[in-house]
Image: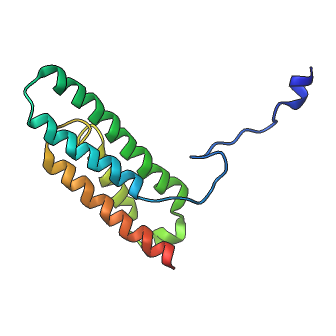
Amino acid sequence: MLARLLRPRHEASAHCDLPCGVYDPAQARIEAESVKAIIKKYADNDDPVFRTRALIIKEQRAELVKHHLWVLWTDYFKPPHLEQYPQLHQLFWDATKLAGAAGAKGTVDPSLADDLLAKIDEIAKIFWETKAA
């Protein structure tokens, strides 16, 4: 009975226990750099066991890229940002697609990893402009 009385009535979730306001596109960039490096290591190695491990890790890192991008998109950026930067929606759409199955997660094409990094850089530029405002 005591446990029932002490149980919270409402639950909330965020990327942290308390919405801290600490956001940084560098998190997505670090994971995307990892994806690019793994693609290179995959191409430079013929060992099938190594290549399988590389693909698994690359897919995990690409998923983290998507996670960090979506945290920025859904938690940091607000409607006034979209008014000021109308390209944001398309930019995030393109970046998450490049991180996903049709992009870096699902291929070993280094040019897609470069494209992903370029999109993250565009997002970062806008992010830092909004932080300076």
Residue 124 visible in rendering: yes
At horizontal 13% and vertical 21% (from top left) the residue drawn is 48
- 67 or 41, which lies in front? 41
At horizontal 67% and vertical 50% (from top left) the residue drawn is 18
Q: Quadrant of residue 60?
A: top left
Residue 87 visible in rendering: no
Quadrant, the N terminus: top right
Q: Is residue 9 above or below residue 113?
A: above
Counting the numbered discs, the total is 0
Question: Residue 71 appears at what percent x and percent y?
Answer: 49, 51
Q: Is residue 52 left or right of residue 44?
A: right
Question: Residue 85 appears at what percent x and percent y?
Answer: 41, 72
Farthest-out residue, bottom: 133
The colouring scheme, among rainbow, by chain, secondary structure or one colour, is: rainbow
Q: Quadrant of residue 40?
A: top left
Q: Is residue 82 above or below residue 65?
A: below
Question: Residue 98 appears at what percent x and percent y?
Answer: 26, 48
Q: Is residue 69 left or right of residue 100?
A: right
At horizontal 20% and vertical 24% (from top left) the residue drawn is 52
At horizontal 46% and vertical 59% (from top left) the residue drawn is 24
Q: Is residue 31 above or below residue 76?
A: above
Q: Is residue 49 above or below residue 23?
A: above
Q: Quadrant of residue 39?
A: top left
Question: Residue 72 appears at what percent x and percent y?
Answer: 47, 56
